[in-house]
Image (spheres, rainbow, N blue to C red):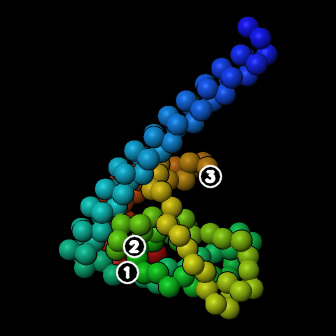
Amino acid sequence: MSDADWSAKAKENADFHAAALGRAREGEARVGRRLIAEFVQAAVAAGLPQSALTVRPYRGNRRYRTGLTGWYLLPDQSVAVDADANFYILSCPPSLTGRLRGIEMPPSPAPLRVGERDGESMALKDLLAKRLAAGAAHP
């Protein structure tokens, strides 16, 4: 096998695996969005109050406004969902403009496990059930 053939085959394999990973992530996001939509429906039916969502910069303790409302899922207010079943990871780089004007946060694809990178992961389904059970007393 020549170097050109080997490179072409390696690129073909990499493209195949990248496409498969993309499809898996899209499927996971669809399932996550459905779980969040069910949570939103239950939260509205239970009269669970929404909060103004704020973002914490990577460094510091300040919070930046987002203009969004929804429900925080974790006590540290690092992830949240809104009434449109969007999932948000509420962190951003520090910014003077953000402090003054607020931050525009795009939704993130909903993972089926929240917190995998920090070592304290929990299934999204369990996290949503726990948040619903906490009711208005959630920190």
Residue closest to the eye, 127 or 26: 26
Residue 88 x/y as whole percent: 50, 67
Point out which mark residue 82 bears: 2
Residue found at the far bottom of this picture: 100
Q: Are marks 2 and 1 in contact (CB under 8 Å)?
A: yes
Residue closest to the eye, 4 or 32: 4
Q: Earlier in the sequence, mark 2 or mark 1?
A: 1
Q: CA distance from mark 2 to mark 3?
A: 23 Å
Residue under the image location 43 percent in, 81 percent down:
69
Q: Are marks 3 and 1 in contact (CB under 8 Å)?
A: no
Q: Earlier in the sequence, mark 3 or mark 1?
A: 1
Instruction: Indicate whether 49 appears above or below 6.
Output: below
* Type of amino acid under label 3: Asp
Q: Is residue 44 visible?
A: yes
* Type of amino acid under label 2: Asp
Q: Which residue is mark 1?
A: 50
Q: Quadrant of residue 3?
A: top right
Left or right of 86 in this view: 42: left
SS type, badge 1: loop
Q: CA distance from mark 2 to mark 1?
A: 8 Å
* Type of amino acid under label 1: Gln
Viewport quadrant of the N terminus: top right
Q: Nearer the viewer, mark 2 or mark 1?
A: 2
